[in-house]
């Protein structure tokens, strides 16, 4: 095998390794981004549910206070 062929094979092997590392990093970053998106969705749903619960509680208290005023 000539030096040129050996060099080309080494370069190809190095490029293949680099491509595999790059692909693996891409998969890892995609997984991390998906986890962040899922966490954000859970957090926002929790905020929405909390806001709804507060609205319902506030509405119930206001209604009860209004009924109490009407009874006087």
Image (cartoon, rainbow, N blue to C red):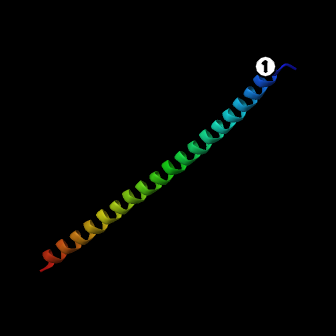
- The residue most toward the bottom is 72
Q: Residue at x 18, y 77 (%)?
A: 68
Question: Total marks drawn?
Answer: 1
Q: Position of residue 54 (x, y in %)?
A: 31, 65
Q: Is residue 7 left or right of residue 43?
A: right
Q: Secondary structure at mark 1?
A: helix
The quadrant holding residue 14 is top right
Q: Position of residue 61 (x, y in %)?
A: 25, 72
- The residue most toward the right is 1
Front-most of residues 5 and 61: 5
The quadrant holding residue 27 is top right
Q: Quadrant of the C terminus?
A: bottom left
Q: Position of residue 28 (x, y in %)?
A: 61, 45
Q: Residue at x 74, y 26 (%)?
A: 12
Q: Is residue 54 left or right of residue 40?
A: left
Q: Is residue 57 left or right of residue 3?
A: left
Front-most of residues 42 and 4: 4
How many C-alpha atoms fall within 10 Å of the one at disc 1: few (<14), some, or many (≥20)?
few
Q: Position of residue 17 (x, y in %)?
A: 72, 35
Front-most of residues 63 and 2: 2
- The residue most toward the left is 72
Q: Residue at x 38, y 59 (%)?
A: 47
The quadrant holding residue 60 is bottom left
From the viewer's perspective, is residue 50 above or below residue 34? below
Q: Quadrant of the N terminus?
A: top right
The residue tagged 1 is: 4
């Amino acid at each position: 095998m000539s030096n040129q062929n050996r060099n080309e094979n080494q370069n190809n092997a190095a490029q293949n390794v680099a491509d595999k590392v790059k692909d693996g990093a891409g998969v890892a970053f995609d997984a991390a981004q998906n986890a962040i998106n899922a966490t954000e969705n859970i957090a926002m749903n929790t905020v929405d549910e909390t806001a709804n619960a507060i609205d319902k509680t506030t509405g119930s208290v206001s209604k009860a206070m209004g009924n109490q005023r009407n009874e006087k």
